């Protein structure tokens, strides 16, 4: 592994340290949230965020839009989107990308499920539109949006599109993922720490998937 990082560093001098830095940062943030918020029940910041949203952001006009954005990482949509993406990749004979997408999705789903079952954090009280029955930490929408749209962003980066179009497309997908997380806090179905923890979990898993495939099953 050390030799791989050395070789990869020579070919991607700026990319690797940044990616590893974000990976370590994501792990640290997730660990801090787990310790301070989930185990120690230090939820002051979460309630302050809710208070801020209620006072300055939540409006009757914005609520339907937040609900619609939230659906871009819903279980219903992901059940369609993942098989569709894998099917398209198989049709065009991108077999390794199809395998990558499958394991990224299945692994991410397993992580979310076991994390929720392990921590058993209750959902916020008084949701705006509807009540979620599953546990709250980490946010499945935030985790899965980062994995799914992050996978798409990574595939776009591997194409031969002009760099400016790659950046535009990847920025859009990342912002969409972040907005989905924002919508979950807005709708009062997740705490801010749930969403931030979900983003960290999603990024960490995607990073490990990309590292594994670049190391043993290059996609290009």
Image (tube, rainbow, N blue to C red):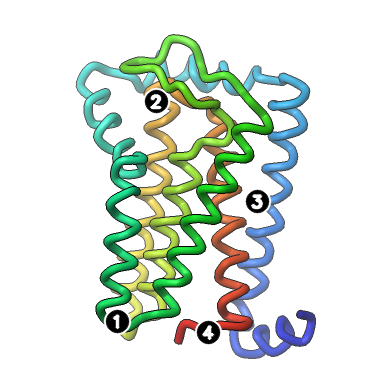
Considering only order in the chain, which callout, 2 or 4, is on the residue closer to the N terminus? 2
- SS type, badge 1: loop
Considering only order in the chain, which callout, 1 or 3, is on the residue closer to the N terminus? 3
Considering only order in the chain, which callout, 1 or 4, is on the residue closer to the N terminus? 1
User: Where does the image place residue 78, in percent across and percent down from the top left?
Assistant: 34, 48
Quarter of the C terminus within the rendering: bottom left
Q: Which residue is mark 1?
A: 161
Q: CA distance from mark 4 to mark 1?
A: 19 Å
Residue 157 placement: quadrant? bottom left
Vertical order, 89 against 119 (above or below): below
Mark 2 Cα shell of 10 Å, populated few (<14), some (14-19), many (≥20): many
Residue 43 placement: quadrant? top right
Considering only order in the chain, which callout, 2 or 1, is on the residue closer to the N terminus? 1
**In the rendered structure, are the residues bearing label 4 and label 1 in contact, judged by CB atoms less than 8 Å apart?**
no
Q: Which residue is mark 2?
A: 186
- SS type, badge 2: helix
Give me the disc on residue 26: 3
Mark 3 Cα shell of 10 Å, populated few (<14), some (14-19), many (≥20): many
Is residue 115 left or right of 128 when viewed as pictured? right
Vertical order, 33 against 100 (above or below): above
User: Where does the image place residue 65, in percent across and percent down from the top left?
Assistant: 23, 31
**In the rendered structure, are the residues bearing label 3 and label 1 in contact, judged by CB atoms less than 8 Å apart?**
no
Is residue 156 left or right of 146 when viewed as pictured? left
Q: Which residue is mark 4?
A: 218
Residue 70 placement: quadrant? top left
Q: CA distance from mark 4 to mark 2?
A: 39 Å
Q: CA distance from mark 3 to mark 2?
A: 23 Å
**In the rendered structure, are the residues bearing label 3 and label 2 in contact, judged by CB atoms less than 8 Å apart?**
no
């Amino acid at each position: 592994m050390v030799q791989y990082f050395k070789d990869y560093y020579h070919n991607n001098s700026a990319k690797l340290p940044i990616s590893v830095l974000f990976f370590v940062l994501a792990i640290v943030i997730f660990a801090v949230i787990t310790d301070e918020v989930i185990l120690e029940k230090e939820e002051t910041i979460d309630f302050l965020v809710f208070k801020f949203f209620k006072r300055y952001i939540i409006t009757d006009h914005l609520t339907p839009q937040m609900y619609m954005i939230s659906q871009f990482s819903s279980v219903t949509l992901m059940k369609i989107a993942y098989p569709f993406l894998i099917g398209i990749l198989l049709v065009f004979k991108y077999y390794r990308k199809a395998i990558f997408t499958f394991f990224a999705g299945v692994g991410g789903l397993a992580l979310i499920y076991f994390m929720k079952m392990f921590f058993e954090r209750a959902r916020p009280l008084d949701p705006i539109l509807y009540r979620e029955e599953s546990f709250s930490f980490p946010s499945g929408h935030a985790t899965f949006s980062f994995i799914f749209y992050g996978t798409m962003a990574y595939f776009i980066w591997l194409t031969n599109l002009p760099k400016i179009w790659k950046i535009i497309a990847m920025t859009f997908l990342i912002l969409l993922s972040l907005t989905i997380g924002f919508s979950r806090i807005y709708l009062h179905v997740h705490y801010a720490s749930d969403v931030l923890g979900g983003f960290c979990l999603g990024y960490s898993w995607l990073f490990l998937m990309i590292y594994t495939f670049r190391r043993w099953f290059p996609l290009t």
